[in-house]
Amino acid sequence: MGLFNLFKKKVNMVVKKRTPDNKEFKIVNMDSKVEKSTHIASEFKSPVYGSDEKKDVFVPRVSDIPVDAYDFLRKEPIKNTGKDSDNPFPEFRKVEPRHKKEEKTNTVVVEEKETITEFFGDKTEEKTVEEPVKTEETKAQVFKYEENDEPNPSFDPTVFSSLFGVDVDKPKKNKEEPKENKVDDSSSFSESIFSEPVEEEKPVFQSREESSDPEKEAKAHRDKMERIYKNYKLPPLSLLPEPVFKIDNDDEWNVNNIAIINQTLQSFRIDGQVKEYTQGPTFTRYAIMLGPGVPGSKISNIQDDLQRTLATSSLRIENPIPGKPYVGIEIPNLNRRSVTLRELIGTEEFMNSKDPLLVPVGLDVEGKVKYSSVADFPHGLIAGSSGSGKSVYLSCFIASLLYKNTPETLRFFFIDPKQVDLSQFDGIPHLLSPIVTDPKEGVNSIKWLIDEMERRNTVFRSIPGITKLSEYNKYADSHKGEYKKIPYIVAVIDEAADFLLNAGNEAQDLLTKLLQKSRAAGIHVILAMQKPVAAVVSTTIKSNAGCRFAFKVTDRVDSMTIIGKTGAESLLGRGDMIYYLNGDTGRYQSGFISGADCVKVKEHCQSQAPLDYLFLPSELDKKNNSGQSAEIDELFGDIARYVVYEGRCSINAISQKFNVGYNRANAIVLSMEYFGIVSENQGTKARQILITPEEIESKLQSIGVR
């Protein structure tokens, strides 16, 4: 808003405020003196006052009585006294901006000198101005002038300085507010972590060009995170609800089932009878002892008949029961019991174990907890249809690892195209990067994992006798001054079939390479999917994923794909699964953890340590597009010199000059962008040349190009 409009708006506001209904409008002629003029009735009808408009207009004469000033809105002269006695228009001095009416408190008195140029001369006075104390909640000023605004030349800026208290000619000064040490509200830390003075943090991701000494800053950052991890406290069991053990007396029901099974075997002339039964949390297993020479396949042949005579919704035959000379028949219980995660990880075996990768599988039919180490997998494959309990078990799997590890010993990497199941763990300090949802970013992240795998293997080869991560960490403990521990990495890819189909063949090739070589480097991959499609889950992936978790699937084909035999299609769902590891199988009931409990565990982890991402998928994509992963072209040096000496970068000019195709010229330009020779693509504008001709040779020498 210009100064003229501002003055006009201010005067109109004053007129409306100072004109009551019982006063007449007057116009004072200050330039000429007239004795008196007749009034003329106006036919004008005011849109504001309606029929009660003022019809008389007076042009009064100027009184000969010496007075200080006239109020042009009043009849009577005003005798001015006090500090505003020299001001002929004291009405303007009493008008305050609207924003100052709300700031009647928290004011301080500031003495300052102000030059007021009035309509009838220049006068100087000293006055006391009240300014509000600046606080964080102070609103922006109503009258705000931009730096590029220029005053209207038709008006004297000193007049507005007098009227509104704004010094137009005086440049504005930005008052520096006192700096405060603010703590991020997203995570709270214990006081012991910040017992020492901590320097102001710099961004974790900083390019080599922006950082003066990246190695020194990286070392300082690592030392700081080590101090934080020393005070890290693992989540307590009190965050999870206590298990509820419900005891049901089903003896009569079991006796009746045993009689039905024996009678059915006799009806089909099968020599065998039930010797024992075991009741688990979700199903009961009846052990049948067959006579000499009777094949166990005869029991499988009458599976449908047994299910019909027992009147059960599901029936599974286990031939034979591992470690026993019996054939098992498993049927659902009348009343199922829920198994909580606290029941599985609250045992001494789990809490006292020194294996950082120990996870609970579930409860077996005898009520014993089955544990397994991720290091023994070395990679896992989880499959199950909707409602089978696959996602809940994945949450239990991650939460159990959080109960055993700090971010210093274990890091997670998540790919979640569905953006639902793994999002409840978003923000834990164990994450390598933000959760990846885009297939292209997922491919670039897998490339990063492969590079990390190669780096770790190179470190292991440099130390005699070291072949895997566990051995290296023991060696690092005995040589603390020279070596530091390397954390395990568990990569979880939810909806892996959908991700691999959308990412293309490149993702399958990269994932296969990662599965084949990452075991010794301490990188383990868990693939979860609803339907194990044979076209996606290739034999190479299955051969490297030696551990399988088969929840209820839709048909026998899926069961054969995931565990190599039938049976998963007969499971009960809701956590009922078949665990397969290197040829051995077993049926277990997995644990249950609610979404609210997952949030409690996540919030506890967030309160112990801040986020410390090692890479950003978006940055990886930018680097890959800039030519980082591509080999340097043989014409790179000649084209770089040509671009720098010419002072412009044009792909068409490069193509014509060096007789190369557009795609090859574009790839070379992207490589020059990555190495800092030219700027990024600026749309219709040409790329800028970032180095001088004198610097090109040293730049090419640092890259390794002649």
Image (tube, helix red, strand yellow):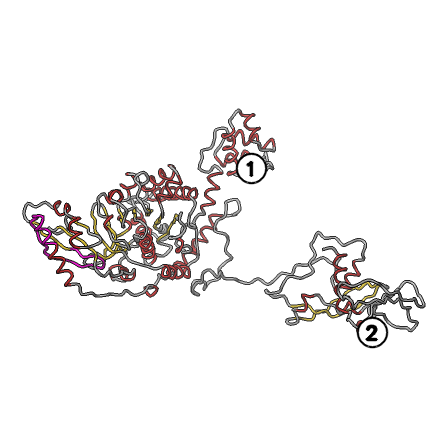
Residue on which the image places disc 1: 678
1 vs 2, front mark: 2
Residue type at mark 1 is Val
- How would you rate the neighbour count of disc 2 (Cα within 10 Å): few for under 14, some for 14-19, many for 20 or more? some
- Compared with 1, 13 (above or below) is below
Could you say where residue 238 lies in the image, as x and y percent from the top left? 33, 66
Displayed quadrant of residue 236: bottom left
Could you say where residue 169 lies in the image, as x and y percent from the top left? 75, 57
Residue on which the image places disc 2: 80
Residue type at mark 2 is Asn
Is 249 positioned to the left or the right of 267 in the image? right
Displayed quadrant of residue 681: top right
| Quadrant showing the N terminus | bottom right
Which residue is more in the foreground, 387 or 279?
Answer: 387
Which residue is more in the foreground, 425 or 450?
Answer: 425
Q: Residue at x 30, y 39 (%)?
A: 534
Q: Is residue 87 visible?
A: no
Rounded to the nearest angstrom, the CA distance separating label 1 from label 2 is 72 Å
Residue 460 is marked as: none
Which region is colored magenta? 261-285
Looking at the image, tell me whether mark 1 or mark 2 is earlier in sequence order: 2
